[in-house]
Image (cartoon, helix red, strand yellow):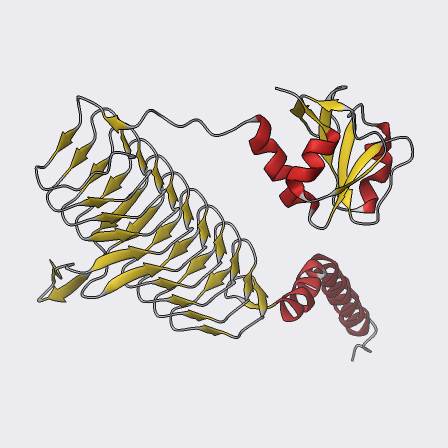
């Protein structure tokens, strides 16, 4: 498939500077692009790379130009380029219908527009929305709800009483609704507290591969609209994650923590139980948030225990200077020892 630069500009709502009749047959990075490809930049610091690139056209910010290149000027270049990527690489959609190897209870609602893959198991009273795609080997427990246009990739396990909204994507190997880690100690022996709550995942959430989201103990674990969760993240029981929050890989969130809207959480962050993270806070990679801690709105924290970035940088600067300080202390100690020795040697003898 080929599209002209003009057709692509119309798709992304941009304006052309250069030859609108150029034919584009693919997308690529600036470094790997060949003639016939389109690439993008979102900052003038990439101008030199873009002008040296073999790409036939480049998507650029509004008001931007590249000498010798045909460009499409748009307000949000990365978003526009994502649209073009999907134009040339549309997502594969399996055929609608139920694979003959699927095992589905009699009272499950599956619309004709849904795609149910091989070896799927769906238990009683589950409701599947329109155009839902359920990949091979998925298990959906009783009384689950899957919203319209949701995609569940192969080998996802969804326990009973889980509600998933519309346009949600859950990648392979994730487990939604497993028991939370709830135990109590009686006379030296641990006993399990029943985990009878649920999980609610709202619209437009994306969940990466091998993510685990535990069900609430009595209430619900909740992932709010638009949140994006990377691979290998653990979300414990009764956690609430606000809207449009992003969580990078290998983060662990302990029980009953509350993360507000628009929070950014870096990779390998550890969040203790009953923590509250304020709106638009940023947690740097490998930050450790102790149990019960409150992170204010819009605060940027780093380190373990996590503290404001300005404080962390100041402390880290002192930490970096410790070897030099230690050498100075050792040198001073030697000088003091020599002075004491000299003073002792110079004492008059009786």
- Asked if residue 259 can be seen in this view, the reply is yes
Residue 80: percent from left, percent from top:
65, 42
- Give the position of the C terminus as an image quadrant: bottom right
Q: Residue furthest bottom?
A: 350
Q: Measuring 30% from the left and 28% from the top, which residue is drawn there?
A: 96
User: Residue 95, located in which quarter of the rendered image?
Assistant: top left
Q: Measuring 80% from the left and 23% from the top, which residue is drawn there?
A: 54
User: Residue 344, located in which quarter of the rendered image?
Assistant: bottom right
Residue 22: percent from left, percent from top:
78, 24
Q: Nearer the viewer, residue 22 or 160?
A: 22
Q: Measuring 70% from the left and 57% from the top, which residue is drawn there?
A: 323
Whether residue 25 sits left or right of residue 299 in the image: it is right
Total label count?
A: 0
Q: Nearer the viewer, residue 348 or 19?
A: 19
Residue 84: percent from left, percent from top:
62, 34
Q: Measuring 55% from the left and 67% from the top, which residue is drawn there?
A: 280
- Asked if residue 33 can be seen in this view, the reply is no
């Amino acid at each position: 498939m080929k599209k002209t630069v003009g057709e692509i500009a119309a798709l992304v709502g941009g304006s052309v500077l250069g030859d609108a009749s150029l034919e584009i047959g693919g997308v690529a990075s600036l470094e790997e692009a060949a003639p016939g490809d389109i690439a993008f930049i979102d900052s003038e610091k990439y101008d030199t790379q873009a002008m040296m690139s073999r790409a036939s056209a480049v998507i650029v910010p509004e008001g931007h130009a590249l000498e010798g290149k045909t460009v499409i000027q748009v307000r949000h270049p990365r978003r526009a380029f994502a649209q073009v990527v999907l134009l040339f690489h549309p997502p594969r959609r399996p055929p609608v219908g139920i694979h003959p190897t699927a095992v589905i209870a009699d009272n499950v609602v599956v619309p004709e527009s849904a795609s149910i893959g091989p070896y799927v198991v769906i238990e009683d009273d589950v409701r599947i929305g329109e155009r839902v795609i359920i990949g091979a080997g998925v298990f959906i427990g009783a009384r689950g709800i899957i919203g319209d246009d949701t995609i569940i990739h192969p080998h996802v396990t969804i326990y009973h009483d889980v509600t998933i909204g519309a346009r949600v994507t859950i990648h392979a190997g994730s487990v939604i609704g497993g028991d939370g880690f709830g135990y109590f100690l009686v006379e030296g022996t641990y006993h399990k507290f029943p985990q009878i709550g649920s999980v609610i995942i709202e619209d437009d959430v994306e969940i990466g591969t091998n993510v685990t989201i535990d069900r609430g103990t009595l209430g619900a674990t909740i992932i709010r609209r638009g949140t994006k969760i990377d691979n290998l993240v653990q979300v414990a029981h009764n956690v609430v994650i606000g809207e449009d929050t992003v969580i990078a890989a290998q983060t662990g969130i302990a029980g009953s923590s509350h993360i507000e809207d628009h929070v950014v959480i870096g990779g390998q962050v550890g969040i203790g139980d009953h923590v509250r993270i304020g709106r638009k806070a940023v947690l740097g990679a490998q930050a450790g948030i102790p149990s019960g801690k409150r992170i204010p709105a819009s605060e940027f924290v780093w380190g373990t225990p996590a503290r404001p970035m300005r404080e962390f940088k100041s402390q880290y600067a002192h930490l970096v200077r410790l070897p030099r300080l230690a050498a100075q202390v050792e040198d001073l100690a030697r000088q003091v020892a020599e002075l004491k020795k000299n003073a002792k040697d110079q004492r008059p003898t009786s």
